[in-house]
Image (cartoon, helix red, strand yellow):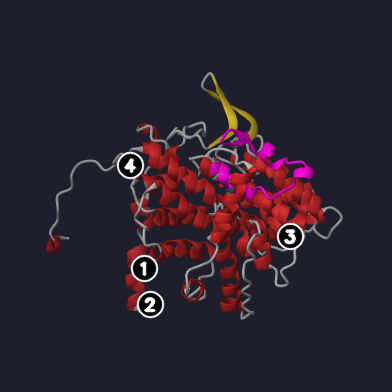
Amino acid sequence: MSDEKERKIALYENFKAINAIDAAYYDQYDVKRGLRNADGTGVVAGLTNIANVHGYVVSDNEKIADEGSLRYRGYDVYDLLGTDAAERRFNFEEVAYLLLMGELPTKDQLDRFVSVLDAERELPNGFTASMIMRDTPPDIMNVLARSILLLYAYDQDAEDRSPHHEIHTAISLISRLPRIMVLTYYAKRARYNNESMIMHRFIPGQSTAETILSMLRPDRSFTQEEARMLDIMLCLHAEHGGGNNSTFTTRVLTSADTDPYSTYAAAMGSLKGSKHGGANHKVLAMQQEIKENVSDWSNDDEVAAYLARIVNKQAYDKTGLVYGMGHAVYTKSDPRAVVCKRFAEELATGTEYEAEFNLLRSIERLASEVILREKGTSKDMCANIDMYSGFVYSMMGIPEDLFTPLFACARMPGWAAHRFEEIVSGKRIIRPAYKSTRGGKRPYVPMNER
Ligand SMILES: CC(=O)SCCNC(=O)CCNC(=O)[C@H](O)C(C)(C)COP(=O)(O)OP(=O)(O)OC[C@H]1O[C@@H](n2cnc3c(N)ncnc32)[C@H](O)[C@@H]1OP(=O)(O)O
Ligand SMILES: O=C([O-])CC(=O)C(=O)O
């Protein structure tokens, strides 16, 4: 073994031992691992008027599973999306307005908001060449994060914390991120796959969903049904309370009084995680592995046997997780997954995708039973939004590279609304305590005595 290799091994061989904390301490000191109570309910860490995420009721100190519901500023998402055919329009902009401004817009207010969004889509001169096409990393989420950080440099008032600047920055990111996302997709393909770099201009006046499709499709064409479906997917991803990992990240950074760009870039890093927004990407790869290893996808016993291998860390990414299943709040159902599943069924029925849709449905139906059987833990578990979202996107011809970035573009208004609320109402730096498990003081040992 080379000296260099040996030196490196010496640095990391104790990684696990040094960082391990005896699990018994968590009980001993009543420490809420992951800020979660023993029954899985979250420790209440803040107050919010922005969303209500409901998945259980607590009665006599007992957590009782319930159907999931999601409200933005008091409005049920199903009501927000259920505009009748005569009134069909793109709702993401309306939802963004509701989240940021607190009220549903009048027609006039919405028109003005849309025109402000439209005016912000342009990127600074040279930005595409220096930020998007240069050293493009393989994950678009990292480009979104670094782009946000760099946009700070183009904002002369970047350190201004006034409401005007906060709202302006949020609107400009809601407007620009979808463009940056699609441009990066083509830059990535050019860099790693040697494919042509397509750089369609955005078309002024198009909604966010239309902008994404018209920039993404090489021939710029899409149907109104496709754009409307993408629009609803964006609405479903727009907000999820203060406690989800990326929004809490937003809250944490905001409470330290850092700038909006640093805050949203950090939220992006959180959302990328496989247990959070990155799960949509993992579901597809997991499904692919099941497809390759299970000969009859319609055979429950075969599918369940493979899920058992996943849960027992013998298959897929060996974490033991069935991606797309489980949620920190939802127990019986995730209302967003219900809509995604309906879209998936509509698009798949009677097509080459039908068998794959049925496989996802079997995974959803079988997973919690398999987890209970293999791990002996009973947990009310439902499919979450990430179970069917990637599949819906795939059927719409949207590439896998965009799954999590689309989530990020959609969540931008939610993050911003929470940043605003934290600025106005938080008033304390978020600073929980960590109990030290190390006993007494260690005497310092001089270098020559170690
Ligand atoms: C947009 C979103 O962020 S939606 C969530 C997307 N994430 C995923 O789909 C990843 C898979 N799911 C998960 O990792 C989890 O269910 C989470 C992170 C979503 C929520 O987790 P929680 O409800 O907090 O469950 P928690 O982490 O407390 O797990 C309780 C036990 O159930 C297990 N468990 C939870 N979900 C799953 C799952 N999907 N597959 C297998 N086991 C699971 C955990 O491993 C844990 O077991 P342990 O006690 O032996 O460690
Ligand atoms: O609420 C959560 O923990 C995760 C989630 O579903 C989201 O952020 O959309």
Question: Which residue is label 3 attached to?
Answer: 396
Give amino acid for label 2: Met
Kindly report the distance in space between the C-alpha atoms of the residues bearing marks 2 and 3: 51 Å
Q: How many marks?
A: 4
**Mark 2 and mark 1: Cα distance apart in space:** 10 Å
Q: Which amino acid is tagged 3?
A: Met
Q: Which residues are magenta?
A: 70-99
Question: Residue at the right extreme?
Answer: 350
Disc 4/disc 2 C-alpha distance (Å): 49 Å
Residue that carries the numbered disc 1 in the rendered image: 9
Task: Give whichever of discs 4 and 3 has the lower sequence position.
Answer: 3
Viewer-nearest of discs 2 and 1: 1
- Residue at left offset 71%, top offset 44%: 339
Foreground label between 2 and 3? 3
| Residue at horizontal 50 percent and vertical 34 percent from the top | 49
| Label 3, residues with CA under 10 Å away: few <14, some 14-19, many ≥20 | some
The quadrant the C terminus occupies is bottom left
The one of 398 and 16 positioned closer to us in this rendering = 398
Q: Nearer the viewer, residue 23 or 112?
A: 112
Compared to residue 27, the image places residue 343 above or below, namely below
Label 4 environment density (alpha carbons within 10 Å; few <14, some 14–19, many ≥20): some
Residue 18 lies left or right of residue 201; in this view the side is left
Label 1 Cα crowd, 10 Å radius (few <14 / some 14-19 / many 20+): few
**Distance from Cα at disc 1 to Cα at disc 4:** 39 Å
Q: Which secondary structure, mark 4?
A: loop
Residue 1 has which mark?
Answer: 2
Where does the image place residue 93, in percent across and percent down from the top left?
Answer: 61, 49
Classify residue 121 by image quadrant: bottom right
